[in-house]
Amino acid sequence: MPDVEPRLMAAGRETPPKAGDQADRRAARAMPSPRLPSAPAGHGTVALVDFASYYEQHLAKLIRHLMRQGARPHEAAEAAQAAFTEAYAQWDTIRHPAAWLRQVALRLFLRQPAHREELTGAPPDRPGGICPLGAVELKEEENRVYAALAALPPLQRQVLAWHLDGFGLAEIAAALGKTPEAVRQNLSRGRARLKEMLLREIAGGGK
């Protein structure tokens, strides 16, 4: 049997194939712009344009990252929005926004009440309570990967979530406060377990 891991996991990568990339762009365009406060000192026009561009390009990816960490879609969307709001106030000082946003968004997600089923309020700048996830279409393969990730031990799931976003061992170790060797071991074990679960599901017809 051919190795199905790359095919099944491609939908969750930070730099997915063309079709997945188009889906991310569609999802990002459908996301609302954050309700931005008055620009703090030091936020010039260039910084604001840079922030808006980064938000549009990376919000959908941040939501997917949180879903790989076990968040439900609405929980992930709310935490991602809140993380970008925090980032806006200090955008000029954030040197590595991809890692910073993932750390902050996870912290905000973990602070949410358990078992949230929907957003607590209407997304910023989208009247009528329209859910920002309405245009996010998760493919069947993505849903399989998320379900399998949820069954992994927490550290393996965290390491894989960062790995699937394109971060290297040293970057993941710094973000999680672990040694590179610990990250390497958990990545290896997590990938093996994930592959085993996905293959078992395929063999069983997805039941």
Image (spheres, grey):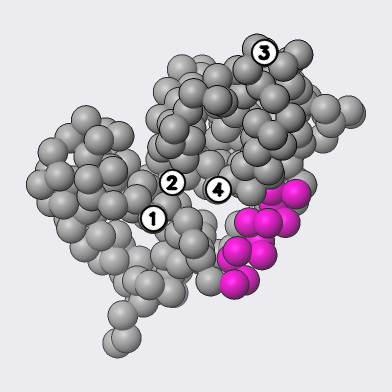
Residue at 72% x, 16% y is 39
Q: Which amino acid type is marked by label 4?
A: Lys
Q: Is residue 14 magenta?
A: no
Distance from disc 2 to disc 3, alpha carbons, whole Å, reads 33 Å
Residue at 15% x, 44% y is 180
Numbered tag placed on residue 44 in the rendering? none
Note whether 116 is above or below 132 in the view shown. Answer: above
Q: Nearer the viewer, mark 4 or mark 3?
A: 3
Residues marked 4 and 3 touching at CB (< 8 Å): no
State the image coordinates of residue 66 (x, y, percent, origin top left). 48, 39
Q: Which amino acid type is marked by label 2?
A: Arg
Task: Identify the image quadrant of residue 25.
Answer: bottom right
Q: Is residue 106 visible?
A: no
Instruction: Kindly identify which residue carries mark 1.
Output: 166
Q: Nearer the viewer, mark 1 or mark 3?
A: 3
Instruction: Kindly identify which residue carries mark 3.
Output: 40
Question: Would residue 72 appear left or right of 123 to someone viewing this image?
Answer: left
Instruction: Kindly identify which residue carries mark 2.
Output: 68
Q: Where does the magenta region start and end?
A: 18-29
The residue most toward the right is 128
Lower position in the chain sequence, tag 4 or tag 1: 4
Residues marked 4 and 1 touching at CB (< 8 Å): no
State the image coordinates of residue 129 (x, y, percent, origin top left). 83, 29
